[in-house]
Image (spheres, grey):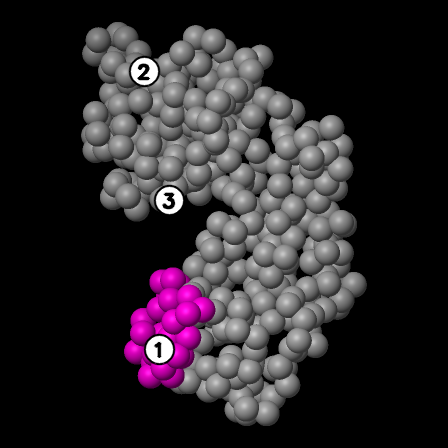
Amino acid sequence: MAESIVSHTAPVTLAEAATLIATVRSNRFLLEGEPGIGKSSILRTIGELTGLPTVYIDVPNLDLGDIAMPVVDHNTKTTKYYPNSRFGLHEGKPVCIMLDEYTKGAGPVKNMLHPLLEVVNPRLGDLSVHPDSIIFLTGNLSTDGVGDSILPHTAMRLVRVEVGKPAADPWVEWAVAKGTIAPEVITCVSKNPQLLASYRDPSEQGNELIYNPKRTTGSYVTPRTLELASNIITQRHKFTPNALLAALAGTLGMPGALLMKRFIDYADQLPDWRTIIADPENTPVPTSPGACSIVVFGAIQRIDKDTLNPFMKYLQRLPHEWQAAFAINLAKNPQRQAIAFRSAAFAAWISKNEDLL
């Protein structure tokens, strides 16, 4: 088993990796990183950057017949391979193919996909790849202990790049901009950056919240499982508290579930959104930082042109740092910024509080 790369620089971000792959199309990049950090999401980003159709290939679940099949040509009395249509190569147009978890694929499957990795005349079966196509691979670090391997003759054809786990602040910024992540989850990560720490950091060896190949046997916290937990939390009013905790434990692990539950309890004690909008000057305001954070991040997701002005009245009763957090994140949110910039109340707050920004 080949070792994962030993990086002498900081690992690249997901955005940096996407730009590399979209720019240097002739090379085959292998993105290596810890489980659940969002490597697979790069496919959509590259598609948006390049305009190419995207093709997701789940390599560990492939058998040889899923890649190409031999077909008899009775006229020439020969055979040739017809690649599976899922790869999109039969149309002769450029495509972006992600060979996800290539390093976990079966040996014969890897061998059959190997011609795609060539710089000169890459092909699949008997079909050549359009020269403007993009093909890249993903896998986990060998230290993750989840069955990844790559042979030396394959490694020499690849540009191996380590993708880092996102730190708490960039993840929070992404989550706010996405607009669908529960404010309780955003606040929990914001207040507990250890949720996104790496087991490779010697100081995090005792961190029971995250993946560690020496200890992990069940669920744990990653960017992927945080999004799954958000899906559960946003619908918690439909099931019992016991079911909520069980589902979170099955998603984040029990340490992560118990930590997340604290922020859910905060949220459940806060004033209803409709009450805030109906009576912003008299509705009680929270005092704890955790509760203020949930109010702010929750408001960014709910704001529309009719509710922003009354919420600005309520916001100005919160501590100044939370007012600034709301304004900054609202202005950066692609779904909400147009509403903010058309609001006289928001503009008045900016004019009055420029020193906080």
In space, the residues marked 3 and 1 are separated at their CA atoms by 38 Å
Prevalent SS, magenta region: helix
Residue shown at 34%/20% (left/top)?
116
Q: Position of residue 167 (x, y in %)?
A: 54, 45
In the current view of this chain or complex, which residue is farthest to the front? 355
Amino acid type at mark 3 = Arg
In the picture, the disc for residue 96 is none
Amino acid type at mark 2 = Glu
Q: Which residues are magenta?
A: 330-357
Is 194 situated above or below 295? above
Q: Are marks 3 and 2 in contact (CB under 8 Å)?
A: no
Pointer 1 residue = 351
Which image quarter: residue 213? top right
Amino acid type at mark 1 = Ser
In space, the residues marked 2 and 1 are separated at their CA atoms by 58 Å
Q: Position of residue 106 (x, y in %)?
A: 54, 19
Residue shown at 48%/31% (left/top)?
10
Which image quarter: residue 307? bottom left
Pointer 3 residue = 44
In space, the residues marked 3 and 2 are separated at their CA atoms by 23 Å
Pointer 2 residue = 118
Does 338 appear in magenta?
yes
Q: Are marks 3 and 1 in contact (CB under 8 Å)?
A: no
